[in-house]
Amino acid sequence: MEGEERRLAASLTARYSEWVLEELDELRGSFLLTDPAMPGHPIVYASRGLAALTGYPRRELLGRNARLFQGAATDRAAVSGVREAVRAQRAHQVAILNYRRDGSPHWVLLHLAPVFHAADGRVLHFLAVQVPIAPASPPRRHPGRPAPLAACREEARGEEELPCASHVGEVFVDIDKRGLEAEELRIASGCDKEMALSTANNIFSTLNRYSKLTGLVVCERRCDSVGIPALSSSLNLSLGRIKQSFVLTDRHLPDMPIVYASDAFLSLTGKDFCCSNHLTYPGYSREEILGCNCRFLNGPGTSAEVLEEINQHICREEACTVHLLNYRKDGSTFRDLLHVSPIRNSSGKVAFHVWVHLDESAKHDFSGLTPEVWQLGAVGAVRVAVRSLSASGSLLRPSQ
């Protein structure tokens, strides 16, 4: 048994150093980590909070599949949504009825997220955070009026299934246990969702920090930067002096990847506080963004018509300004005043496209300028930096 525990622990310690287990033990919240490369997709780490929530001793959870939390009334559609998210290797949130060790049911918000190898995009682990959902207050009823019907939950659906040679499909899935009995549905609140994301962000921060000790870097989003040219230190230095929120993309590379992201843009993808807890939610790191297409900001509410308008202007090598609904790292939305403009080198050819983002709901000091003119100032600064350095051939690192 001790040998099996060491083997499961090595799934973490070999990738994140020997100290990662102690650091994870200090984190608050109910969560677990699974290894899709091991037979049965077992749990390789369980937090103290998870043991308290479920009644299972931590040693009893290790090595088992996370389907052990399912029971007779666990909703089939919820399980199917989680399964599809695992197969597609993407994050997923869903309210689901789980069961404790003593057989008692309880509702939780399940936040599932893959842990990617930043260099090659492999999934190393899956993180599952469980936040208990409190029962809703009973609605007030007028005498003689029937109770309203509960609204049906809309389950998230996977966009596509990605092939995987590991055991990822086995997580959270038990085809022998299907939800047959009616159970009162609970809806996760905004604070429940924020708490799940905050816990996940803290865990990813810990894994990222300790993974660097082994020479491995992990991240929340697959970002295949192979073949993405590195900008020269001179260009990076010049772009770093521009304080606006923007990214540079290269349309000459497959899928038009991001090759530079400003500090202000990284801050834009996070937010300062949530609810009354004043919790901080950091945005994406630069490692998560470089090599990705700008669509990573898009979500269900993003206008396809506006995105098509942007694509048409890019193809015509024209600038455009649009209003777009985009999404931060924590899933919250913001109204984005977006200006996209081609950036030409000293020979007149388009070298990059600059995407200047502005959160229309935030307070800004434009020094008396309109938001549009303020964005054009960023475009002009980027244009000067690119043209001046392209004349000397120093846009990319010499090795490129």
Image (cartoon, grey):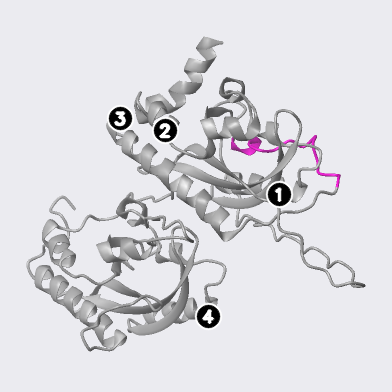
Q: Residue at x 36, y 52 (%)?
A: 288
Query: Which comes before the other along the chain, label 2 or label 1?
Result: 2
Q: Nearer the viewer, mark 4 or mark 2?
A: 2
Question: Are the residues tagged 2 and 1 within 8 Å (C-beta)?
Answer: no
- Tell me which segment is drawn in magenta: 168-181
Reading the image, the residue beneath label 1 is: 78
Towards the viewer: 393 or 199? 199
Q: Residue at x 52, y 11 (%)?
A: 2
Q: Secondary structure at mark 1?
A: helix
Q: Is residue 126 visible?
A: yes
Distance (Cα) linking label 2 and label 3 = 21 Å
Amino acid type, callout 2: Glu
Distance (Cα) linking label 3 and label 1 = 37 Å
Reading the image, the residue beneath label 2 is: 26
Question: Are the residues tagged 2 and 3 within 8 Å (C-beta)?
Answer: no
What is the number of the mark on residue 257? none
| Percent of width and height locating residue 99 | 72, 36
Distance (Cα) linking label 4 and label 1 = 31 Å
Amino acid type, callout 4: Glu
Distance (Cα) linking label 2 and label 1 = 30 Å
What is the number of the mark on residue 214? 3
Question: Are the residues tagged 4 and 1 within 8 Å (C-beta)?
Answer: no
Does residue 241 sit above or below 104 in this rendering? below
Q: Secondary structure at mark 3?
A: helix
